[in-house]
Image (spheres, rainbow, N blue to C red):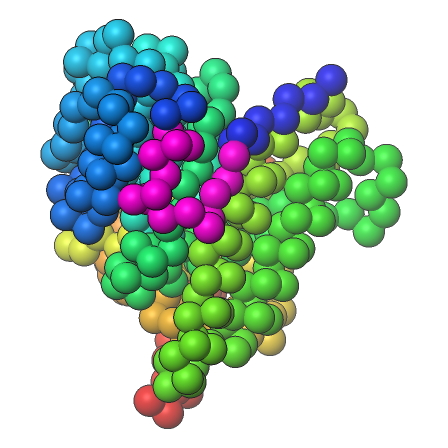
Amino acid sequence: MSDIRMPHAYENSVSIEDAGPLLSNLGRSAFVIAGRRAFAAAGQALSKALDGQGIDYVVHYLEGEPTVSRADAFAAAAAGRDLVIALGGGKVMDLAKAVSRRTGARLVTVPTIAATCAAWTSVYLLYTEDHKVDRHEWIDGVPELVLVDKSVILAAPERYLFSGVGDALAKWYEECHAEDDSTIDLLYRLRTRIGSLTRDTLEHEFLDRYDPAAPQDVVYELKSEAVDSIMLLAGLPVGFRPHAPHKAVPRLELAHAFYNSWTWVPTAIRPLHGELVSFGVAVQLAQQGADEATLTQYLQRIHRIGLPVTLAQTGIERDEQVHTLATYVVEGIPGYSGPYRQLTVAGYELALREADRIGRSVISADPQ
């Protein structure tokens, strides 16, 4: 038996402003959770869509982190509403999923940036007030609608899109691959195939071809396809949840373990989720014994769009930070997934330093 969780609709051809009929089919009373910047960018369009259909709604802004206490408070405020609408980035998506789970209201996600696949997936993270990963939960269902207005998403700073590319690529690298997968659970094989398509689209069709100096219509088309890869392709595998682990090749989610553990290490800077995950992929490759050419090629690709390729670029600069990070990855962070007992702290520290060494070489060799 397997559990497959997919949004009921993924809409990338309708603007937010024109989405009223889609929303009215899902509910007549909405609780909108938004980031302030997101509402400034798309709130007027969403309000027009809701007002045009006579949908009653209230707007609550996320200030701070999506915490358990904040999820409970927002859920209490949303009581009686039949629709939760998330307008914003990953944190807003996480909080909206938590509210939907607690209230039973239907969920619509309206991403205003493409920094992660959070708009699609039924899993979400909750944090402490100081941005430490606290726990992950799953909504019982799925988003009813993922509304992807590319005119809004592609108007956001490029950094968010590039972060999303880094996050999406991890969906391939975190899958564990077998030479003969004929005996592996079908859903795991499906995850691997989709991950391969995601990698091919983002590495070969986006990273290898992206040139900001190219004609704007060419750049727009590349970015537009990247948005769908981040939202749709990267989100798909997360919805496949096989219940036959004895038939499955286990996943090694070290790139996301790097992110989760990083949030528990005090640093002077706060890179985006996908920026950290992208460097986490390099560390995972080093941990798995990838040769220098493979690591160099990967780091060169992500360096082209400004993703971090050294520990310093993630805020990890001191030996004690490296050791703390490695310890959290191997032994687990408080109350969360892990640990990776098949690893050793010393071995993971070596992987961190190897990825960092090659990343510094990539920067040194860059003529720019």
Q: Is residue 20 magenta?
A: yes
Give the dominant element type of the magenta stretch: helix, strand or loop.
Answer: loop
Q: Is residue 134 visible?
A: no
x%, y% of residue 237? 60, 39
Q: Nearer the viewer, residue 236 or 47?
A: 47
x%, y% of residue 262? 32, 45
x%, y% of residue 175? 63, 45
x%, y% of residue 31? 24, 22
Quarter of the image that includes the C terminus = bottom left
Q: Is 166 placed above or below 17 here?
A: below
Image-based side of 36 in relation to 289, left or right: left
Q: Is 325 placed above or below 314 here?
A: above
Q: Is 363 placed above or below 93 here?
A: below
Q: How many marks?
A: 0
Q: Is residue 190 magenta?
A: no
The quarter holding residue 147 reads top left
Image-based side of 355 in relation to 186, left or right: left
Boundaries of the magenta span: 9-23
Q: At 38% from the left edge and 55% from the top edge, which residue is drawn?
A: 150
Q: At 13% from the left edge and 42% from the top edge, which residue is drawn?
A: 36
Q: Is residue 28 visible?
A: yes
Q: At 37% from the left edge and 25% from the top edge, which residue is drawn?
A: 24
Image-based side of 111 in relation to 338, left or right: left
Q: At 66% from the left edge and 36% from the top edge, which residue is drawn?
A: 250
Quarter of the image that includes the N terminus = top right
